Structures are given as structure tokens and as C-alpha cells.
Amino acid sequence: MAEEQIGARLRAARLQQGISVRGLAQSLGVSPSLISQVETGRTQPSVSTLFSIVNELNISLDALVSDGPAAAATTPSDERPRARARQDVPPVQRQVDNPSLRMENGVDWEHLALDPRGSVDMILVTYAPGAASSIEDRLMRHAGHEFAYLIEGELTLRLEFESHVLRAGDSLQFDSTRPHMLTNHTDRIARGVWFVVGRRDESLPEAPPTIKRTSTEVTSAVDALRVFDRFAG
């Protein structure tokens, strides 16, 4: 879907709720010009900025990018079409059929072997030099448990107050409800295979008291994976 169409849906959702550009920007801690540029399709937001917008407007990314009516905010999440039966999912998924998402912050996601009723999401993730999961330097958290194997390059994982440098051949695992962020501090791409388990259980515990909660904290990174559900539905 073109950025202009996504921007138009965001604008429609904002207007439907009677929120001004300046009011939305103030709630998110960003500039009004950024909101205007996103709504007109002149710029593509980072992952965390887009998550913050849809969270503030109480809409989901799957409704935002679907081929249905433009008024994404009028489609409750519990009215999404049911996923097809497991037996209808082919055992082999060709590379040309892999759904992909390219984010403004230099991160590419390519979903492998889709099974909308399974408990595991398998994703090929590529970080361009200098890329990060949040260009605003804010930690993300979402339901599920992450496992990953780094194929090439180097990534730095910030997990709450700790930092870990991963290189090719290293692997990781952590509870995704813990605030986290991944960054490529090098001048070479980093690529790995991620397995996100249980992300469809969307309940989130309260953030630990030592983690500052703000109006722009990203708590629904799982929404990005919902986009891929549309390809398998």
C-alpha cells in the first residue's frame, strides 16, 4: 500500500476522533510537521513512530494496511476475518511470495513460512548500517518471546539496562515484554532469522517500576506482525 493511502487513513482516523494535528503531535512528543508529512505521504515514519500513532488513535496496523474501506478506525480488531484452516496452509513458501515490510529506520522484515494459526512467527530481519528498531532511542515491548540467530554482521541488543553485542554465529532469547531495542552500530549490514513465539497472546504486564512510562512508549510492536497476517488470511 502506498504511503499516501496509509497517511490518508491515519488522517481520517484522527479527524474521526476530533484530534488536531497539533494535539496528536503534543501527545506523541513529535513535531506537528512530522504528523502532516506522514498523513500526506511525504515521509515514512519509523516503526516506533507509526506504532505510537496507531496506539494513540486506538487503531491497529492490520486494519490500516488492509484492502478494505479507508476508515480503518471503524474496523474493530475482533471483526477481522478468521484465519484460514491450518490444512489450507502450503508446506512450502517460495521466496517470491514472502511478505515484506521496509521501515524508514533502515530495518527490513521478510516473513518466512506463514502459518496464521501457528504460535511461531519466523522472520528474516536485515539491519542496514546505523539502523535501529527505534530511531527515537525508545525501548519497545510486546507480547511473546524472541529467539534469534545472527547470520552476518553485528547487532547491539539493549535489554532494559543491559547491552549485549552479538556477532555472526551468536544467538539470543528473551521475554519480549521486557523493554528492548536492537541497533546496528557498524558500517555493514546485519542479518538474522528471528522466531517470535506467543506474540498473539497480547496481554502485557505493567512495566517494572524502574522503567519510566511515557505517552510515547511503544507497547504494541506485535502490531507490525499483524500486517503479515493479512497475507495469510
Image: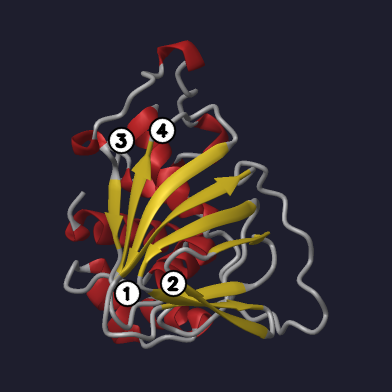
Q: Amino acid at mark 3?
A: Gly
Q: Position of residue 215 (x, y in %)?
A: 60, 78
Say whether disc 4 or disc 3 marks the residue closer to the N-terminus. 3
Residue at image point 59% right, 55% down: 146
What residue type is disc 4 on?
Answer: Leu
Q: Which residue is mark 3?
A: 68
Looking at the image, do the residues carrying marks 1 and 2 touch, with CB atoms under 8 Å apart?
yes
Mark 1 highlights which residue?
105
The residue carrying pointer 4 sits among few (fewer than 14), some (14 to 19) or many (20 or more) residues within 10 Å by Cα, namely many
Disc 3 vs disc 2: which is toward the camera? 2
Q: CA separation, marks 4 and 1? A: 24 Å
To which quarter of the image does residue 178 belong? Answer: bottom right
* Secondary structure type for disc 1: loop
Give the residue number, with chain letter if any, for mark 2. Answer: 133
Residue at numbered disc 4: 114
Q: Can residue 72 be seen in this snapshot?
A: no
Q: Residues within 10 Å of mark 3 (few under 14, many from 20)?
A: few
